[in-house]
Amino acid sequence: KLVYLYDANRISLAGTVGLSMSEDVGARFEAYGWHVLHVNGMDVDAVRGAIEAAKAETARPSLIVARTVIGFGSPKANTFGVHGSPLGPDAAAATKEALGLAAEPFALDAEAVALWREAGEKGAAAEREWQERLNAYATAFPSEAAQLRAAWAGELPAGWDADLPTWEAGSKPVATRKASGEVIAKFFPKLPTFIGGSADLNPSTNTAMKGAGDFEAPDGTPDPATQQGLLGGAWGYEGRNIHFGIREHAMASAVNGMAAHGGVIPFGATFLVFSDYCRPAVRLAALSGLKSIFVFTHDSIAVGEDGPTHEPVEHVMSLRLIPHLSVVRPADANETTAAWRLALTHDGPTCLVLSRQDLAVLDLSDARGEAAQGAYVLAEPEGDPDVVLIGTGSEVELCVNAAALLADLGFRARVVSMPSWDRFDAQSADYRRSVLGPEGTPRVSVEAGTTIGWCRYTGGTGAHVGVDTFGASGSGSAVLAAYGFTKERVAATALALLGQEELAREVDETLGGDTAGVEAKGAEGHS
């Protein structure tokens, strides 16, 4: 279904292509298993013939390498001067003369206009024919046609989320990446349009759909070009697990392509630190308003043993900076269920940011609001709060524990879980005020990532517990403790904000965690 025309004019913006590239593009695509054709791109009939030949090849995508002359007919033909700049009045006039075109501006050639109109008429006829076939299909198979129309409209089947998993507060801790896997296992059988995979990380991101098959053929498929040899290529279209390989940018681009095509709900997964490799495609998903879902796991310095190369610091915040991109970092298993519900019902791209380490299942029974609103009060003290602790993801549990410590010291702390900035910002001013408290309320943000940007919610006089340097190698708990992610440090930060510096120093005499063996260097892979 894919025919790609490669304009081989051998000119780049800065000069000839030979300055920076010497590869044989056609040979590269042949090595990929593509059907490759070479034509004179200045010969319309030759190009037309190549397109017909490509359309006749149904087993492989086709690449037509068309050798062309950039700026043909102009004084700047075959030079980089015509690549990124307008011709200018004199060169434009000379070009028109060379091509036999009318000299007046914006003159339209009658023959060219007729060809364009003919193409429009052909397109309209093709659409009418397609609609007739669809109507005939709907008459013969009304149930299937209804499902097809619903898929194209992006509608979810009734009851798709009826039995999504829930966890009892205080039950066995579970990593949000693992909770996500359990959520997927519940809804994917009811969502036949849900399809995707990871960048060679299914076991770690917990995104494999058991029993859904692979979007590939088993080893033993003949190479379609020669009908010889073995090729484990992507020819089994019924599978829903896509093995993208270690190609994060290509994965996110493919997810975007499927979302733009419509009829499916695509996702791609990798570690959060590798979101850098697919950022251009994630940004394009937001720019285009595509319903692409990106699952980013191993979301903080708690990755531990893999060391600073694999420990995201600035990544969550940098994703939040992309306009129209919804970013959700759930605090526990139940918020993870809510996060998937948000992603699947959101008409736009979503990033789910999930933990590697196990997290406590929190008590949401007294929560005012829910994750769908982006932030809500998870725990409220008796009486007006002295301070508001705002956490996301794995640090919400830390805020709960710090609030309990503050209560023992006679201070009242409200705990706010804020899984999604963009969702919270979309709420009314009254709701936001009800969660964060009135202006002037002392606030502390707690997130295992950069503190840059948190003044948006804490105000200019707030305080922050975060990571503004690179991570370190060691056990996850040791790294977190070494960087101050303990209930003592959070409580002490709140006390200092309240003017209780001496008490803060007493509370923070110990970090309350094992910091042995923490080194600022890499370690063996550990997922």
Image: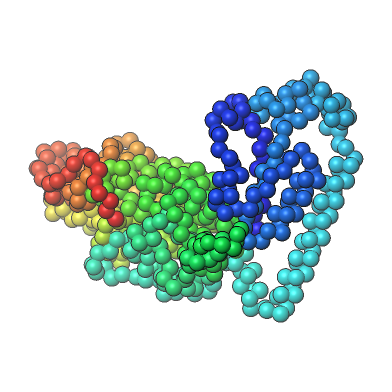
Q: Between 271 and 237, which is closer to the camera in this rendering? A: 237
Picture layout, residue 518 above or below residue 54: above
Picture layout, residue 166 above or below residue 479: below
Q: Between 357 and 217, which is closer to the camera in this rendering? A: 217
> What colour scheme has been applied to the protein in the rendered image?
rainbow
Q: Is residue 193 left or right of residue 341?
A: right
> Which quadrant, please, contains the N terminus?
bottom right
Task: Tell how many labels.
Answer: 0
Q: Between 343 and 367, which is closer to the camera in this rendering? A: 343
Q: Residue at 58% across / 45% down in the picture?
A: 27
Picture layout, residue 397 above or below residue 96: below
Outermost residue on the right side: it is 110
Q: Is residue 55 left or right of residue 300?
A: right
When asked about the image quadrant of residue 363, the answer is bottom left
Q: Residue at 68% across / 25% down in the picture?
A: 79
Q: Is residue 246 left or right of residue 158?
A: left
* Residue 394, position as x, y percentages in the image: 28, 54
Whether residue 169 is visible here, answered yes or no, is: yes
Q: Residue at 77% across / 26% down in the picture?
A: 74
* Residue 243, position as x, y percentages in the image: 46, 59
* Residue 26, position as x, y percentages in the image: 61, 44
Q: Residue at 53% across / 74% down in the picture?
A: 158
* Residue 175, position as x, y percentages in the image: 29, 61
Outermost residue on the top side: it is 90
> Which quadrant, please, contains the C terminus?
bottom left
Whether residue 328 is visible here, answered yes or no, is: no
